Image (cartoon, rainbow, N blue to C red):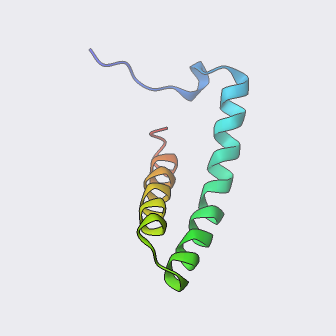
């Protein structure tokens, strides 16, 4: 049987870190998207894809 993920089971310092990361991931992703539009390189595209996946995971509360 699979255990359900509960953020309340995490230690307080980890919950705080998670909340801070969730706040900053969208502005960082937007900045990286603008930077990728201006100077696209393979590393920029890869980094943008990773940031989008992380942002979606925070939004859907998978992390």
Q: Quadrant of residue 24?
A: bottom right
Front-most of residues 11 and 38: 38
4 sits to left or right of 58 = left
- Please count the marks in the image: 0
- Name of the residue lying farthest toward the bottom: 38
- Look at the image and tell me in which quarter the N terminus lies: top left
Q: Residue at x 62, y 71 (%)?
A: 31
Residue 40, x across and y down, in percent: 47, 78
Q: Is residue 53 left or right of residue 21?
A: left
Residue in view at x 57 percent, y 69 percent: 32
Which residue ends up furthest to the top in the rendered image? Answer: 1
Position in image of residue 16 (x %, y %): 72, 34
> Taking 53 as reference, is 35 above or below it?
below
Residue 56 vertical position relative to residue 33 in the rendered view, above or below: above
Q: Residue at x 67, y 42 (%)?
A: 19
Q: Residue furthest left?
A: 1
Pick the residue in front: 28 or 38.
Answer: 38
The one nearer the camera, 50 or 62, is 50
Picture quadrant where residue 56 is located: bottom left
The percent position of residue 50, horizontal first and vertical second, equals 45, 55
Query: In the figure, is residue 16 to the left or right of 22?
Result: right
From the viewer's perspective, tell me whether residue 8 is left or right of residue 20: left
């Amino acid at each position: 049987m699979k255990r359900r993920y509960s953020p309340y089971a995490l230690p307080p310092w980890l919950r705080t870190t998670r909340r801070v990361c969730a706040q900053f991931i969208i502005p960082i992703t937007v900045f990286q998207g603008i930077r990728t539009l201006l100077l696209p390189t393979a590393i920029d595209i890869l980094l943008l894809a990773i940031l989008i996946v992380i942002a979606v995971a925070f939004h859907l509360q998978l992390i």
